[in-house]
Image (tube, grey):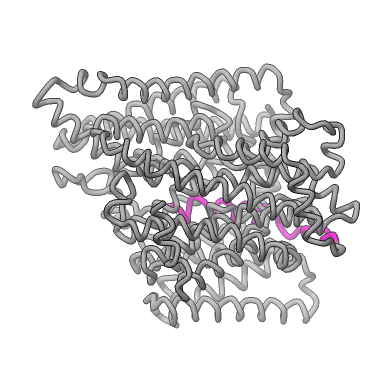
């Protein structure tokens, strides 16, 4: 195992161990105790397994999981940022359909292998986005009658 | 023979229309690499809200059946398995296609899938009522151990690491405790208003299965999948039927292996296909031809992965314990319609249960008929660029999660769990035990509390949960599955090189 995945394993399993121990602490200290009997049982096993995994990661004995390569991280980052902004902010702030249209188009443009310099490519992307949104609107707004947040825009 | 009584319900215009829609849609979704049956069914659940329970289940069941079979199209024509269940099909199916026998390979795969699938559904029909009757005798302690068994078996058998599989199960069980406690009404782990009512299962399932796939597509960057579709020449269907029945041994091995593996909770179609392929190679008179485009390889793999579908639903319909991630998603689909599967499902909702099972029977035939004719279209759809697929899946995931309760909180939960699951998967954790933990958590807790109350008033907790042959049988299975997986892990480490392990993990991710 190279140093990069090993360090990543230590960070990841360390984080999970912290979560496990915190949950166990909360379960054993919160009141009423009767409401936390089952969480105590679960969190005890959770904490023990998480610490075990963390210790194995520190000792470099983790055998499973390839971690995330720098290339993969570089590739996913733009899409991840767009997706996070879309889900946690834009969908509520701009309106569901507007935000989805923008996010869909941006993601398509970011990851479509077709050259950006050709006008035809952009036309195709706009068409795909419009087609997808028409299907989404037809299904969710017309057929399933799902009410969606319509804040600043539609 | 109660299933025959409800057979007519499958053919009402709406039910049959949904069955057709689910079958054709499932074939196309299944052919799309990256859209696993579980994810396809999870994304379809929001579309069933407006439907009657049996209509929703017909759609989901048809999609489940045909996505497994549809995965063979891209496995054969593109050498990209549409789902993990179709890995074994690639070995001989694609070689047949490169030799100009693509149409024959597709016909063999769909015919074998249908035969295996029919056998599996018949097993479901005849085993379910017997087990359901038996399950009526289960008390809280048995149901508690069954829920724990569901999590541990899938956690140990489905994961590359036993510890990480069990840890994934624990995370799921913990997530299930978030919200208000049922008995005391106390708040537990509510660290954000979005989870004040607990974690809704449907958005969680959508997030856990769809979002990691979206991020995986992002990691490919702007590269294009340059897999080439192999054109298919016409091949008479009659000859394909003759070939399938000529290869009786491969068909029988595939069907029986798939059915048995389907009954074991946590062991999925991927394993069924590979085990059946391996076994039919051992028993074949032409074992040297396997891997060179031999029809027995395709027949064994495809009959196995579809034979697994029916039996994988037996624990769900009889004990309310989903035996696979897709069964867990179907359980979510049942729960949103207020139907809780279990021993009394066939007493309280016979129409829902039998119409659903009957539709799976008819669905196998439709899948075979349509599969033979729309394979070319499905293969074209399979070439949709991953940029488009990622954007579509993300959009569907957001809309689907929101539509459950018209709540942005569900969307946040979906996205957060999905994001976390992607990173967890990269470090060897698995979504299946986490999902099982999330779904079985409430069942385990309710029965644990109920059992504790009974125990406190009678024999004491230790005695109540640790006496009786059934309790001990369930505990033994839990322990045996853990020991077996630990042993397999040690053996795999001893005989597998590091490069092999990395290659296997990359192939499965």
- Residue B225 colored in magenta in the image: yes
Residue A21: percent from left, percent from top = 35, 30
Residue B91: percent from left, percent from top = 78, 42
Residue B111: percent from left, percent from top = 69, 54
What's drawn in magenta, residue-wise? B205-230
Residue B227 visible in the displayed image:
no
Residue at the location (31% across, 24% down)?
B470
- Residue B424 colored in magenta in the image: no
Specify whether B294 is left or right of A103: right
Name the quarter where the N terminus of chain A is drawn: top right
Q: How many labels does the image show?
A: 0
Question: Residue A10 sits in which quadrant?
Answer: top right
Specify whether A34 is left or right of B188: left
Specify whether B36 is left or right of B169: right
Give the farthest residue toward the left: B457
**Relative to A101, does residue B219 appear above or below in the rendering?**
above
Residue A12 visible in the displayed image:
yes
Give the farthest residue toward the front: B1
Residue A96: percent from left, percent from top = 45, 74
Question: Residue A16 sits in which quadrant?
Answer: top left
Name the quarter where the C terminus of chain A is drawn: bottom left
- Camera-side residue of B408 and B101: B101
**Relative to B490, does residue B331 appear above or below in the rendering?**
below
- Camera-side residue of A47 and B306: B306
**Relative to A66, does residue B351 appear above or below in the rendering?**
below
- Camera-side residue of B388 and B256: B256
Residue at the location (66% across, 80% down)?
A126
């Amino acid at each position: 195992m190279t140093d990069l995945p090993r360090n990543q394993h230590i960070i990841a399993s360390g984080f999970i161990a912290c979560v496990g121990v915190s949950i166990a602490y909360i379960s054993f200290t919160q009141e009423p105790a009767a409401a936390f009997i089952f969480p105590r049982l679960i969190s005890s096993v959770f904490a023990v397994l998480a610490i075990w995994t963390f210790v194995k990661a520190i000792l470099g004995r983790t055998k499973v999981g390839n971690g995330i390569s720098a290339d993969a991280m570089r590739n996913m980052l733009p899409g991840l940022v767009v997706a996070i902004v879309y889900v946690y902010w834009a969908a509520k702030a701009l309106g569901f359909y507007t935000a989805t249209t923008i996010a869909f188009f941006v993601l398509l443009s970011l990851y479509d292998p077709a050259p950006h310099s050709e006008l035809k490519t952009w036309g195709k992307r706009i068409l795909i986005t419009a087609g997808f949104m028409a299907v989404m609107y037809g299904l969710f707004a017309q057929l399933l009658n799902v009410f969606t947040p319509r804040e600043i825009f539609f | 023979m109660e299933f025959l009584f409800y057979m007519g319900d499958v053919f009402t215009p709406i039910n049959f229309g949904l069955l057709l829609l689910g079958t054709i849609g499932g074939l196309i979704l299944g052919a799309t690499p990256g859209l696993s049956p579980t994810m396809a069914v999870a994304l379809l659940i929001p579309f069933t809200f407006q439907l009657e329970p049996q209509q929703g289940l017909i759609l989901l069941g048809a999609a489940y059946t045909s996505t497994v079979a549809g995965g063979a199209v891209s496995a054969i024509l593109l050498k990209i398995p549409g789902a993990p269940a179709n890995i074994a099909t690639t070995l001989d199916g694609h070689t047949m296609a490169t030799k100009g026998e693509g149409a024959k390979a597709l016909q063999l795969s769909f015919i074998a899938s249908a035969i295996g699938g029919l056998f599996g559904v018949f097993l479901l029909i005849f085993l379910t009522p017997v087990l359901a009757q038996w399950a009526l005798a289960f008390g809280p302690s048995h149901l508690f151990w069954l829920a724990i068994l569901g999590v541990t078996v899938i956690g140990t058998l489905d994961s590359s690491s036993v510890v990480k599989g069990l840890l994934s199960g624990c995370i799921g069980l913990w997530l299930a405790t978030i919200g208000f406690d049922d008995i005391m009404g106390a708040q537990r782990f509510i660290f954000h208003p979005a989870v004040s009512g607990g974690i809704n299962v449907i958005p969680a399932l959508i997030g856990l299965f769809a979002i990691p796939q979206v991020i995986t597509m992002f990691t490919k960057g702007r590269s294009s999948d340059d897999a080439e579709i192999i054109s298919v020449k016409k091949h008479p269907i009659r000859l394909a039927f003759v070939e399938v029945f000529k290869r009786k041994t491969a068909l029988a091995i595939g069907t029986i292996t798939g059915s048995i593996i389907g009954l074991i909770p946590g062991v999925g179609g991927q394993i069924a296909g590979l085990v059946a392929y391996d076994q039919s190679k051992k028993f074949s008179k032409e074992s040297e031809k396997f891997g060179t485009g031999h029809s027995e390889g395709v027949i064994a793999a495809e009959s196995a992965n579809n034979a697994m579908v029916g039996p994988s639903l037996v624990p769900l319909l009889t004990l309310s314990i989903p035996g696979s991630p897709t069964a867990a998603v179907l359980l979510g689909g049942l729960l949103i319609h207020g139907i809780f599967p279990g021993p009394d499902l066939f007493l309280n909702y016979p129409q829902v249960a039998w119409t659903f099972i009957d539709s799976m029977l008819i669905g196998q035939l439709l899948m075979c008929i349509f599969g033979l004719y729309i394979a070319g279209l499905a293969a074209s759809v399979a070439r949709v660029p991953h940029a488009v697929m990622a954007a579509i899946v993300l959009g569907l995931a957001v809309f689907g999660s929101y539509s459950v309760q018209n709540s942005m909180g569900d969307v946040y939960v979906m996205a957060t769990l999905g994001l976390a699951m992607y990173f967890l998967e990269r470090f060897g954790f698995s979504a299946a035990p986490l999902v099982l933990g999330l779904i079985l958590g409430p069942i385990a807790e309710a029965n644990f509390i109920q059992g504790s109350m009974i125990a406190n008033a009678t024999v004491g907790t230790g005695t109540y949960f640790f006496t009786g042959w059934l309790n001990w049988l369930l505990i033994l299975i839990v322990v045996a599955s853990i020991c077996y997986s630990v042993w397999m892990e040690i053996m795999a480490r001893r005989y597998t090189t590091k490069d092999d392990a990395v290659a296997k993990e990359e192939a499965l991710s």
